[in-house]
Amino acid sequence: MDEINTTDAYIIEALIIMAAISLLMSRVIVDELQKLDAKQRESDDDASASSPRLPRRRCSTAVERHSHLIHLYLMLDLGYGLPDLDALLLWASRDPNSHRPRLREEVESGEFG
């Protein structure tokens, strides 16, 4: 959120709501991971004594790291198809600010300073 420079109240409100939903979903997923781990520990009596419990922070980091896969699985579970990879990569690679002069061009022309 700190990377988006805006004073528009609607955008700020939307960002705060999205951050709250993201935090809530992360906590739900972490709780489910801990329940799954507890079930596996019950079935594996030998492994439960030697393996450590799942710390909340480590689980949260794993959820954050793999959020793109979580989104993909959720999308597939909801019946959406996979995006066209070529179109997606082209869209993501295009410069959204192509109309703006580049810093190097400004420095070379003497406009920067």
Image (cartoon, rainbow, N blue to C red):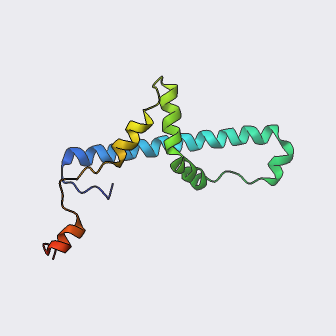
Question: Does 60 sit left or right of 24 as displayed?
Answer: right
Left or right of residue 49: residue 86 = left
* The C terminus - image quarter: bottom left
Q: Residue furthest top?
A: 79
Image location (x, y in percent) of residue 50: 82, 54
In this picture, is 57 found above or below 104? above
x and y, in percent, of residue 80 in the image: 45, 25
Q: Position of residue 70 (x, y in %)?
A: 52, 39
In the rendered view, would you say 67 is above or below 107?
above
**Number of marks:** 0
- Which residue is more in the foreground, 105 or 70? 105
Front-most of residues 67 and 113: 113
Residue 30 falls in which quadrant of the image? top right
The outermost residue toward the left is 111
Residue at 52% in and 26% down: 77
Q: Is residue 103 above or below residue 86?
A: below
Residue 100 % position (x, y): 18, 57
The image quadrant of residue 43 is top right
Which residue lies at the image location 48% right of the left edge and 37% below the top edge? 71
Q: Residue at x 67, y 51 (%)?
A: 54
On the rendered structure, is 24 left or right of 33? left
Q: Quadrant of the N terminus?
A: bottom left
- Residue 42 sits in quarter: top right
